[in-house]
Image (cartoon, rainbow, N blue to C red):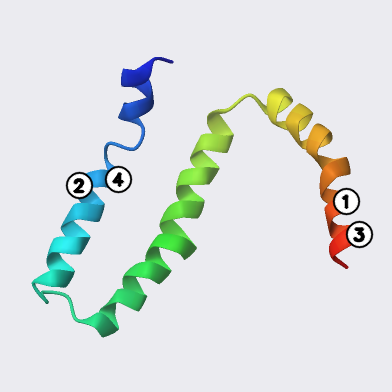
Amino acid sequence: MGAVGALEKPAPVVPAFGCGVLLARRKVVPADSSKVFADYAFLFAVPCFLFGNIHRSDLAALTAVALLLLPLWTQWVAYAG
């Protein structure tokens, strides 16, 4: 993946973020409604996006990474507790 490929991934996010900033500054969307948008984004849209990406990914590679990180995570949890 080159630089162009890396920039294609966040490309749809930048206009959405810009529209959100513009609408908030122009007070088109009230501040009270921003919680609804945040809840939608973090409780619905992001999990759907992640599920789709995990579904299309190589599960063997994900499992290998998880097995490599598991000892580090258990040590971190034991130290934090």
Where's the N terminus, which quadrant?
top left
Name the amino acid, label 3.
Ala
User: Mark 4 — residue?
Assistant: 13
Secondary structure at numbered mark 3: helix
* Left or right of 68, for residue 12: left
Q: Is residue 59 above or below residue 16?
A: above
> What is the residue that sits farthest to the top in this orientation?
2
Split into 4 quadrants, where in the image is the C terminus? bottom right
Q: Amino acid at mark 1?
A: Thr
Question: At x 47% / y 50%, what residue is drawn?
Answer: 48
Disc with the residue nearer the chain's start (1 vs 4): 4
> How many neighbours does mark 1 have within 10 angstroms: few (below 14), some (14-19), or many (20 or more)?
few
Whether tag 1 and tag 3 are in contact, CB under 8 A, the answer is yes
Q: Label 2, on which residue?
A: 15
Classify residue 23 by image quadrant: bottom left
Task: Answer whether labels 4 and 2 touch (C-beta < 8 Å).
Answer: yes
